[in-house]
């Protein structure tokens, strides 16, 4: 959703935009092309992405600074580059197409690969440990919570019986066999939700998201804007709540009455309804079908007068 991200950030004050999930650099490059008065600081926890994108975007080297890091540590990265405030930020959550396409990374249920799924290859926990070592109750919880998988119990029983599960295709087959035949025919590949849930667990994807978004909104200069692209309900719920809390300032007063609790809103939600990709993009990029874009604008310094 490069076009939609650029539209949301087109008129931000000049300065620095944080691309917290730089991946292959699609958003970063589009933003650098869009505005010559913009510098991008890009973060990714995947060292391979940082190396490949640094090479690919070398021609922007005076306006593009990339560093391997988890986005929960974005403040350290901004401090390293001497950045004091942000004109904008973009978080394009989850896994990249490049990570999915490289079979050896183990993210794909369609290609043979090890049960890995680590975005940061230096971390300890792998998908193999989750699949082969986690207790059943924990696995059921993960499949339900991170994958919205209604057959979590059946899948977990099948996984337990098949241990040790050796690779991605083996796991995909075990999951498929556990799902009743009529349900296999709807909702995409039967292993999709299980793979998503295990990936979220391996990379601890939701844990720091809420806190990080709350913090990054406070880094925006007045009229600065932030965009988040979420790909499943668990992520989107977090984004929605953080943005709403920013807009209400945590107000606890009854809805139709004037605020007397001295809440201090920090942002204004730009699109009340989520923005989804255009049909053409959904056709050309299967993964984009589940994308949900939300954006927020930082209020002016005089918060009361601008709200
Ligand atoms: C959907 S891709 C981003 C694609 C990117 N917008 C582009 O245009 O190519 C998500 C990226 O975020 C990275 N990522 C996911 N969680 C992260 C985290 N907590 N900290 C830093 N990077 C993260 C992944 O490694 C992946 O490269």
Image (cartoon, rainbow, N blue to C red):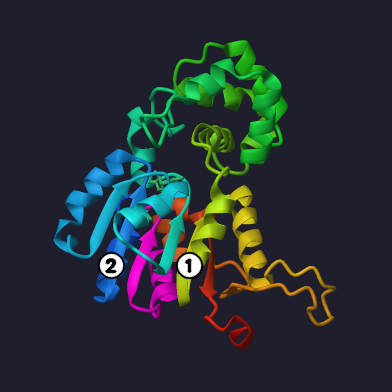
Query: Given the current orientation, which residue lies at the most extreme bottom position?
Result: 305
In the picture, measured across the screen, residue 301 lies left or right of residue 96, that is right
Q: Nearer the viewer, residue 244 or 237?
A: 244
Q: Is residue 185 magenta?
A: no
User: Which quadrant of the figure has residue 133?
Assistant: top right
**Pointer 1 with pointer 2, Cβ within 8 A:** no
Mark pair 1, 2: CA separation = 15 Å
Where 256 falls versus 17 (above or below)? Answer: below
Q: Residue, x 34% and y 39% (percent of image)?
A: 101
Is the residue marked 2 within 8 Å of ligand 1, measured from its CB? no
Residue 22 visible: no
Q: Nearer the viewer, residue 234 or 260?
A: 260
Q: Is residue 5 magenta?
A: yes
Q: Nearer the viewer, residue 266 or 153?
A: 266
Residue 68 screen position, x and y as percent: 32, 44
In the picture, measured across the screen, residue 210 lies left or right of residue 141, that is left
Q: Which residues are magenta?
A: 1-21
Is the residue marked 1 within 8 Å of ligand 1, measured from its CB? no
Task: Report crowding for label 2: few under 14, some 14 to 19, many 20 or more residues within 10 A (C-alpha).
Answer: many
User: Which quadrant of the figure has residue 242?
Assistant: bottom right
Dot 2 lies on which element? strand
Q: Residue, x 62% and y 70% (percent of image)?
A: 273
Query: Which image quarter is the N terminus in?
Result: bottom left
The residue tagged 1 is 226
Task: Report crowding for label 1: few under 14, some 14 to 19, many 20 or more residues within 10 A (C-alpha).
Answer: many
Q: Residue, x 45% and y 55% (percent of image)?
A: 92
Residue 177 screen position, x and y as percent: 61, 23
In the picture, measured across the screen, residue 8 lies left or right of residue 175, that is left
The residue tagged 2 is 39
């Amino acid at each position: 959703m490069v076009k939609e991200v650029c539209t949301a950030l087109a008129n931000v004050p000049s300065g620095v935009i944080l691309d917290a999930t730089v991946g292959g650099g699609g958003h970063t490059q589009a933003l650098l092309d869009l505005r010559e008065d913009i510098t991008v600081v890009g973060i990714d926890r995947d060292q391979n992405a940082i190396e490949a994108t640094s090479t690919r975007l070398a021609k922007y080297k005076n306006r593009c600074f990339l560093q391997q890091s988890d986005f929960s540590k974005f403040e350290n990265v901004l401090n390293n580059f001497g950045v004091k405030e942000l004109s904008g930020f973009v978080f394009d959550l989850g896994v990249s197409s490049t990570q999915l396409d490289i079979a050896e990374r183990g993210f794909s249920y369609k290609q043979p690969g090890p049960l890995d799924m680590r975005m940061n290859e230096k971390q300890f926990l792998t998908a193999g440990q989750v699949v082969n070592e986690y207790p059943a109750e924990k696995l059921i919880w993960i499949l339900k919570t991170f994958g919205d998988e209604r057959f979590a119990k059946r899948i977990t029983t099948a996984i337990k019986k098949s241990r040790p599960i050796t690779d991605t295709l083996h796991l995909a087959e075990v999951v498929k066999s556990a799902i009743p035949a009529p349900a296999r025919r709807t909702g995409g590949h039967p292993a999709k939700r299980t793979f998503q849930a295990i990936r979220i667990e391996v990379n601890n994807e939701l844990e720091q998201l809420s806190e990080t978004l709350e913090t990054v909104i406070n880094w925006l200069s007045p009229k600065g804007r932030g965009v988040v692209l979420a790909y499943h309900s668990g992520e989107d719920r977090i984004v929605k709540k953080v943005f709403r809390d920013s807009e209400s300032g945590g107000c606890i007063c009854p809805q139709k009455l004037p605020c007397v609790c001295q809440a201090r809103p920090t942002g204004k939600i730009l699109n009340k309804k989520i923005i989804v990709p255009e049909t053409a993009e959904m056709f050309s990029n299967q993964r984009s079908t589940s994308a949900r874009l939300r954006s927020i604008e930082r209020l002016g310094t005089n918060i009361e007068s601008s709200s």
